[in-house]
Image: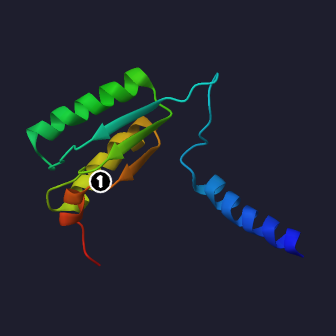
Amino acid sequence: MKKISILLLVLWGIIPSMLFAQRQLSFQNGKFKIVQFTDLHWTSGSPKCAETERTIRTILKSENPDIAILTGDIVTEAPAINGWMSVVEIFNNAKVPFVVTMGNHDAEHMAKD
C-alpha cells in the first residue's frame, strides 16, 4: 500500500508538469544554455524598454538558450499588468521558456490581493 501511495504521489507531480510545461528541458550534447536578464525596471511604452526589448530579442535569437532566467526588479512601474504582458510576450514569441524571481521593486507595483 505504501509503494502505491508513493507511486501515485510521484505521478501526481509528474503528469501535470508534463502536460503544462512550455517544453521539456534537457541537456543537448551534454550542454544546457541559460541566459539571465536582471533589473529590467520595465516601464511600458518607454523608449528605453523598446531598446531593452530589441536587446533581449537579439540575445535570445543569437544564443538560442534552453531557458531564460529573469532575476529581480523586472516590472517596476504601474500598471504592472501591462509591463508583465509585454515582458512575457517577448519570451513567448521567441519560444524560450523562462522563470522569474521577484525583486523588492516588483512587489511595490503588484496587487496586494
In the rendering, at what x and y percent does residue 17 appear? 62, 56
Residue found farthest to the right:
1
Figure check: 62 above or below 27: above
Furthest toward the bottom, the residue is: 113
Task: Note whether 104 is above or below 112 in the view shown.
Answer: above
Q: Residue at x 25, y 29 (%)?
A: 55
The quarter in which the N terminus is drawn is bottom right
Position of 12 with respect to 110 (left or right) is right
Which of the pair 32/48 is nearer the observer?
32
Provide the secondary structure element on which disc 1 rests: helix
Percent across and percent down for residue 9 are 73, 68
Question: Is residue 98 visible in this depiction of the protein?
Answer: yes
The image shows a total of numbered marks equal to: 1
| Residue 61 falls in image quadrant | top left
Amino acid under disc 1:
Met
Q: Quadrant of the rendered structure where residue 11 is? A: bottom right
For image coordinates 41% across by 43% down, the residue present is 92
Q: In the figure, is residue 43 to the left or right of 31? A: left
Question: Which residue is rendered at x = 12% and y = 47% of the image?
Answer: 45
Please determine whether, in this image, residue 63 is positioned above or below residue 4. above
Q: Residues within 10 Å of mark 1 (few under 14, many from 20)?
A: few
User: Where is mark 1, residue-wise?
Assistant: 85
Q: Is residue 109 visible?
A: no
Q: Residue 81, position in %: x, y?
A: 25, 61
